[in-house]
Image: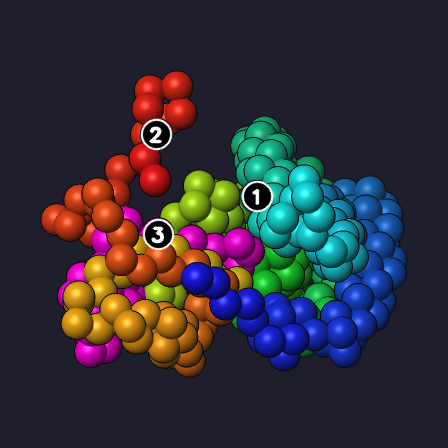
């Protein structure tokens, strides 16, 4: 037996999606302008830190563009080939963004290594002005995206790009001050390496989270022990087995399970299943559920049943 979520439970409401798309589009435009300004500034003022930040900003622009694409394409309805629709595109985009960030950070480390041992003069005043412009824009974009970042892994990826770049802009400003006050030009590549480390840390976390979803891992926000306890707390439910919980995308959870209904309560199976579904939705935010009652031939001792490949056999 299966329940479908009400319209207001969908991960993206129409109004919310429209607001998000508008904010993403404006953010792309602003970030693109910052990229051009920082790239030109890095070249004119001979600053590797600015060029590194420009590379990060370019990835921000790409991440925001991919995020907008993911939001648009995820609106397509499910069909016979993709019964869940295209919500996973958001997760896949986040996964790709993680690897692009790693590539950028490695390139920055490479450039910073050689620049550190062979420092070159840097125009600190121009470097600081450009970095301040980048900081203001990044903070503005981060503020726009923050309300959506906690609800969507795809937007969270873009948000992390922007926040990381804001921190990087602070680093560039610090490097400009050090150079202006001390004349120590090695501060430029050191800050570049710092920017690379920020990018690398965010990329690793993003890849881990998105990979967990792509590999059908149980959502970390769902307490599996509490789920089992809540299901078994209903009168008539003697046991739970063949339990599977996974994420369709960042915060759209699904569950399937077999419920062992006591013989004396089997006339209430429909009522029990309905009440279990309501509890899962209200308490655990699991709206996509498939529950099978009175399962015969199942291993009652196995809570999480092993799945066997079709060519080696088949389990129901």
Q: Is 59 left or right of 268, judged from the image as shown?
A: right
Find numbered disc 2 in the image and state the secondary structure of the residue it sits on: loop
User: Which mark is drawn over residue 157?
Assistant: none
Q: Nearer the viewer, mark 3 or mark 1?
A: 3
Report which residue position mark 1 lands on. 95
Report which residue position mark 3 lands on. 244
Identify which residue is drawn at 43% across, 45% down: 216
Find numbered disc 1 in the image and state the secondary structure of the residue it sits on: helix
Work out whether mark 1 precedes mark 2 in sequence or the reverse, and give the earlier one: 1
State the extent of the magenta-drawn residues as a range.
223-250
Residue 193: within the magenta? no
Using the numbered discs, state the Cα–Cα distance from disc 3 to disc 2 in whole angstroms: 17 Å
Q: Can the viewer see residue 280?
A: no
Identify which residue is drawn at 39% across, 48% down: 217
Seen from the viewer's position, the closer of residues 234 and 163 is: 234
User: Which mark is drawn over residue 314?
Assistant: 2
Identify which residue is drawn at 67% across, 40% down: 81
């Amino acid at each position: 037996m299966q329940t479908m979520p009400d319209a207001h439970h969908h991960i993206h409401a129409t109004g919310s999606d429209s607001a998000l798309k508008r904010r993403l589009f404006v953010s792309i435009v602003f970030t693109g302008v910052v990229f051009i300004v920082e790239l030109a500034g890095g070249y004119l003022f001979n600053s590797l830190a600015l060029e590194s930040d420009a590379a990060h900003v370019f990835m921000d622009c790409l991440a925001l563009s991919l995020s907008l694409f993911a939001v648009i394409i995820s609106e397509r309805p499910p069909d016979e080939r993709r019964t869940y629709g295209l919500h996973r595109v958001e997760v896949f985009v986040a996964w790709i963004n993680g690897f692009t960030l790693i590539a950028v950070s490695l390139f920055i480390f490479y450039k910073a290594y050689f620049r550190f041992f062979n420092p070159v003069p840097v125009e600190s005043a121009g470097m600081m002005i450009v970095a301040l412009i980048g900081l203001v824009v990044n903070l503005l974009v981060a503020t726009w995206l923050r309300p959506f970042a906690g609800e969507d892994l795809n937007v969270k990826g873009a948000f992390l790009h922007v926040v990381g770049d804001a921190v990087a802009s602070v680093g560039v400003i610090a490097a400009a001050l050090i150079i202006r006050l001390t004349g120590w030009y090695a501060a430029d590549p050191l800050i570049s390496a710092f920017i690379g480390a920020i990018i690398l840390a965010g990329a690793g976390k993003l890849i881990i989270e998105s990979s967990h979803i792509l590999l059908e891992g149980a959502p970390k926000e769902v307490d599996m022990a509490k789920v089992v306890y809540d299901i078994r707390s209903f009168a008539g439910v003697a046991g739970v087995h063949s339990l599977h919980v996974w994420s369709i995308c960042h915060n759209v959870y699904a569950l399937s399970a077999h419920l062992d209904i006591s013989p004396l309560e089997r006339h209430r199976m429909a009522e029990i299943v309905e009440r279990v579904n309501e509890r899962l939705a209200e308490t655990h935010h699991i709206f996509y559920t498939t529950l099978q009652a009175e399962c015969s031939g199942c291993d009652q001792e196995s809570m999480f049943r092993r799945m066997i490949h079709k060519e080696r056999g088949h389990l129901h």
